Image: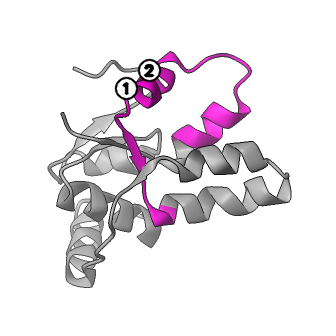
Amino acid sequence: MNKILVDSSIWIGYFRSQKSFPILDDLILENQVCVNDLILAELLPCLYTKKEYEVIESLKTIEKTVMNINWEIIIRMQSENLKNGINKVGIPNLIILQNVIQNNLILFSEDRHFELMKNFFEFRLLGYREKLI
């Protein structure tokens, strides 16, 4: 089964939530989740500031995917987005998407840009309201 790259939008909701995230809890227990350095770079500074050391150590134990950024692909993806009216997609999101496609991962995210890009790029997207099939 494909690993699931959990985007920072999901982790932030997971850490802030007072209720459970059964899908993410199950995926963690089944050892299906992974992160990458970019996602950790988005999450860890705030966690260090809040002295959330247990959370930091937990995140560091999750499998990390290798990132080989291909700038030509990033440029082509952004060009395709602009051509199709998808504006203001940040380079970090394009790097995450390239990482997902390159490593045949499933992306778990609530970022609206990924939902829009799903129409033009071939990748699997899971939102927290969905069930993995």
Q: Are marks 1 and 2 in contact (CB under 8 Å)?
A: yes
For the residues labelled 1 and 2, the Cα–Cα distance comes to 6 Å
Picture layout, residue 113 above or below residue 23: below
Q: Secondary structure at mark 2?
A: helix
- Mark nearest the camera among 1 and 2 is 1
Residue 94, image quadrant: bottom left
Residue 29 place in picture, x, y as percent: 44, 25
Q: Which residues are magenta?
A: 10-38
Picture layout, residue 72 above or below residue 110: below
Q: Is residue 119 left or right of residue 12?
A: left
Picture layout, residue 89 above or below residue 58: below
> If the image is split into quadrants, where does the C terminus sit?
top left
Q: Secondary structure at mark 1?
A: loop
Residue 89, image quadrant: bottom left
The residue located at (48%, 65%) in the rendering is: 37
Residue 13 place in picture, x, y as percent: 63, 35
Q: Is residue 112 left or right of residue 21?
A: left
Q: Amino acid at mark 1?
A: Glu
Q: Is residue 20 left or right of residue 118?
A: right
Q: In this orientation, which residue lies closer to the viewer: 30 or 70? A: 30
Query: Would you name the residue on which mark 1 appears?
Result: 30
Q: Is residue 86 visible?
A: no
Specify the label residue 26 is tagged with.
2
Residue 28 place in picture, x, y as percent: 45, 30
